[in-house]
Amino acid sequence: GSIVLKHKDIFFKRIQWIESERERVFNELNKIPWLKVFPSRTNFLLFFVKDYKKLRDKLIEERISILDLGKGWFRLSIGRRELNDKVLNVIKEVNLLK
């Protein structure tokens, strides 16, 4: 606690960055018609897909680790922008409307 108070400017900048990046990733996921993403106030996003096996297999193939909660539910932690973009690109590649 005292470390945070000593460096609160750095701490608050980091929180602002996470909030901004979370909103960006949420908006991108929200554009995908076969995926349902849920609003969050944390450093992760929860989303659901019906045909989850195809997405799960593609994530494994691309060596992308996001938390598979089972039966179509996934938890995506907000990380560096480059990593978030990589995850978004792989998710978008898996067109579950086909």
Image (cartoon, rainbow, N blue to C red):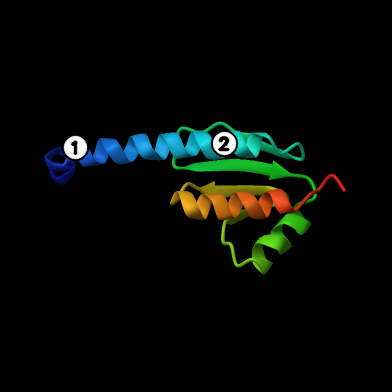
- Disc marking residue 23: none
Q: Say which quadrant the N terminus sits in.
A: top left
Q: What's the distance in space between the residues labelled 2 and 1, CA to CA?
A: 26 Å
Q: Which quarter of the figure has residue 37?
A: top right
Q: Mark 2: which amino acid?
A: Phe
**Residue at label 1?**
8
Q: Pick out the residue farthest to the right.
A: 98
In the rendered image of this protein, does residue 48 appear above or below residue 54? above
> Disc 2 or 1, which lies upstream in sequence?
1
Dot 1, crowdedness within 10 Å: few (<14), some or many (≥20)?
Answer: few
Circles 2, 1 touching at the beta carbon (< 8 Å): no
Query: Residue sitting at 43 percent across and 51 percent down?
Result: 80
- Towards the viewer: 77 or 17: 17
Compared with 40, 94 (above or below) is below
In the displayed structure image, the side of residue 10 where residue 88 appears, left or right? right
**Left or right placement of residue 15 versus residue 94 in this view:** left
- Whether residue 98 sits left or right of residue 48 in the image: it is right
Q: Is 18 situated left or right of 9 in this image?
A: right
Q: Amino acid at mark 1?
A: Lys
Judging depth in this view, the residue of 50 and 13 nearest the camera is: 13
Q: Which SS class for mark 2?
A: helix
Badge 1 element: helix
Instruction: Specify the quadrant of the image occupied by residue 35.
Output: top right
The residue identified by callout 2 is: 26
Q: Residue at x 70, y 48 (%)?
A: 92
Which is nearer the eye, 95 or 5? Answer: 95
Identify the residue at image location x=50%, y=33%.
23
- The percent coordinates of residue 88 (x first, y second) are 61, 49
Q: Residues within 10 Å of mark 2 (few under 14, many from 20)?
A: many
